[in-house]
Image: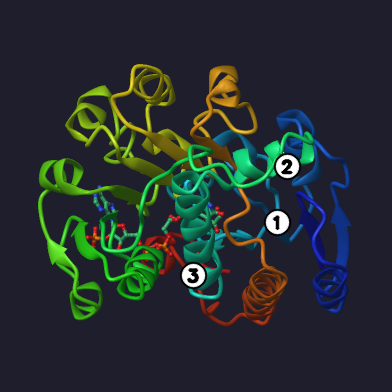
Amino acid sequence: MRKIFVVRRLLDVVLSELRSLGEVEVYNKEDVIPKEELMERVRDVDAVVPLPGVDIDRDVISCMRKCIIIANYAVGYNNIDIDAASDRGILVTNTPDVLTEATADLAWALMLAVARRIVEGDRFVREGRFKGMDPLLLLGEDIYGKTLGVVGAGRIGTAVARRGVGFDMRLLYYSRHRHDKIERVGAEYVDLSTLLKESDFVSLNVPYTKETHHLINAKALALMKSNAILVNTARGPVVDEKALVDALKSGVIRGAGLDVYEREPEVTPELMSLQRVVLTPHMGSASYRARLKMGKLVVKNIRAAFDGEVPPNLLNGSRIRKSH
Ligand code: NAP
Ligand code: GLV
C-alpha cells in the first residue's frame, strides 16, 4: 500500500480522495511541523504534501527513502528545493490557476481595506465609539480613477490588474518580460522605478526567488508616493519588512496590506501597532472553492505519479535525473 504524508490538515473531502490512493498520515497540530519530526515522517512515504512555510530542503529530501512525488498544496514552490528533489528523481508539482481569482480578490480586499480604513472602522464600531456620522472620521484614499501598479505580470498579477478596469484605474505593470494578457486589459509596461514613482497602489505578485529577495527595500520604498499603499500577497521576503516598518512610521508611504511575512508565521511586532496596516494570515487562496480545487489538483498529481504517468502540474520534468 502506498503511503502519503500531509504536513497540515486539509479539507475532509480532499483527505478522503487522497485515501483512495493509499494510507494517509496528517500532521494534525496547529503549529508548523518541526524539522526533525518532518525528517522522520517523510522517511518511508511515497508522496509528501507540503505547503508554504514547511521547507522541503535538501536535508529533508535526503531522508526520503522511497518518495516519488512532492505535491505542493500551493502554486508558489519556493519552500521546495527543486534541485535536490530532481537529483533524487523525485517529481515536484504545484497547484496553479485554480487559486488565481481568489488570491486576486484578496489583494483587492487588502487594497480596499487599507485605503478605506475598513478594519479601523470595524474596531471603532465594536468598541462602542460610533456616535453618528462624523465628516472628519476615518478619512481615507480614493481607489476609483487612481493608478495601480502590478509587479509580476503572471496569472495573479494579471487578475489583479483586470479588476482595476472596473475602478477606471490607470494600470501599470513591471515584470521581467512583457506580457500580452495584462496589456490586453490596458496595462502599460514600465520599469520598476517608474511603477513605484507613479502608482497609488502597488500590488506584489512575483514568486520568491533569489532575484525577488527584498525587491521592495528602503530604496524602492523611497521612490513611492507618500500616499501610496503597498499590497503583498506574494511572499514575505519580497519585502524588507524592517524597511517597510520604517517607511510606514516615517510617512514615506501611507499604508500596507500584507498577507505574507518575512519570517512567517512570525510578524514584526511593530506592524501590529501601526494604524494604516491590514494584516491577514496567509489566506490569499482561502476561498472554499479554491482550496477544494487545490486539493483536487494535489490528488490528480499524486494519482498520475503513482500510475507512472506525468503529473499535470509537473515542475521539474526536464530536470529529473533518475526515472522511476
Ligand atoms: P506566475 O503566473 O508564475 O506569475 C509570476 C510572474 O512573476 C511571472 O509571470 C513572471 O513573469 C514574474 N516574475 C518572476 N520573477 C520576476 C522578477 N525577478 N522580477 C519581475 N517579475 C518576475 O505565478 P502566480 O500564479 O501569479 O503566483 C505568483 C505568486 O503569488 C506565487 O509564486 C506565490 O508566491 C504567490 N501566491 C500567494 C498566495 C497567498 O496565499 N498569499 C496565493 C497564491 C500565490 P516574467 O516572465 O516577466 O518573469
Ligand atoms: C500560496 O501561498 C500559494 O503559493 O499558493
Q: Which residue is mark 1?
A: 48
Tag 2, which secondary structure? helix
**Mark toward the start of the polypeptide (3 vs 2):** 3
Tag 3, which secondary structure? helix
**Mark toward the start of the polypeptide (3 vs 1):** 1
Q: Which residue is mark 2?
A: 125
The kind of residue on which mark 3 rests is: Thr
Q: Which mark is residue 22?
A: none
User: Left or right of 147: which side holds 44?
Assistant: right
Residue 310 x, y percent position in the rendering: 52, 79
The residue under the point 53% across, 57% down is 109
Tag 1, which secondary structure? strand
Residue 168 x, y percent position in the rendering: 28, 71
Q: Nearer the viewer, residue 242 or 301?
A: 242
Ligand 1 within 8 Å of the CB at mark 3: yes
**Mark toward the start of the polypeptide (1 vs 2):** 1
The kind of residue on which mark 1 rests is: Val
- Alpha-carbon span between mark 1 and mark 2: 45 Å
Q: Establish if 54 lies above or below 253.
A: below
Q: Nearer the viewer, residue 71 or 277?
A: 277
Q: Establish if 153 lies above or below 51.
A: below
The kind of residue on which mark 2 rests is: Val
User: Which quarter of the figure is the C terminus placed in?
Assistant: bottom right
Answer yes or no: is residue 20 visible.
yes
Q: Residues within 10 Å of mark 1 (few under 14, many from 20)?
A: many
Q: Which mark is residue 100?
A: 3
